[in-house]
Amino acid sequence: MDLIRLYFKTKKLQKIQNEIYDDFLKEKKESKNRNIQEIASSYQNEDELIEDEILELHTKYLKQATARLMLPLPEHPSYWNRSRITGMNHLSAKGLLKVRKSIREAYSPILLWIAAITGLIGAATGLVSTIGKTF
């Protein structure tokens, strides 16, 4: 899964999540005699399911990125959460941060070389342009 697909799938799920929340607020406002706890519990499972799907998408994307870079995934239980709805494991907030940090650290030497080469190309272009104007 590439970053663009992850972005659009996440946005789609967040839109659905917002619609569910709007429906919850509408029903809460319309119901006068019903207990708010009953209304909230009916929408909570849907919200949790979508949240789990979003976390699962991000976990899958980061697992693929770490596999591509041959980086280890954190094994400590504090980096993982088990979904109450689906029962699947996904990275916790702490785990997401740790994996993203390790990916950034793996890419930093590559980005340094890209920046250096871009600078050299810019300097060479400026030099050629200056030399071309003098002759």
Image: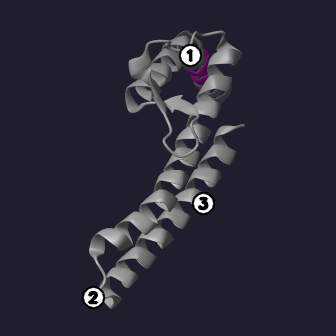
Question: Which segment is the magenta one?
Answer: 117-124
Eyeballing the image, is 26 above or below 117? below
Mark 3 or mark 2: whose residue is earlier in sequence = 3
Discs 1, 2 touching: Cβ within 8 Å? no
Left or right, residue 82 beside residue 68: left
Q: Which residue is labeled 1 in the image?
A: 107
* Quadrant where the C terminus is found in the figure: top right
- x and y, in percent, of residue 82 in the image: 49, 32
Name which residue lies at 64% across and 39% down: 3
Q: Residues within 10 Å of mark 2 (few under 14, many from 20)?
A: few
Mark 1 or mark 2: whose residue is earlier in sequence = 2
Kind of residue at badge 1: Tyr
Quick check: can you spot residue 135?
A: no
Discs 3, 1 touching: Cβ within 8 Å? no
Kind of residue at badge 2: Asn
| CA distance separating discs 3 and 2 | 34 Å
Eyeballing the image, is 60 above or below 43? above
Q: Nearer the viewer, mark 1 or mark 2?
A: 2
| CA distance separating discs 1 and 2 | 57 Å
Name which residue lies at 49% across and 50% down: 51
Magenta region, mostly helix, strand or loop? helix
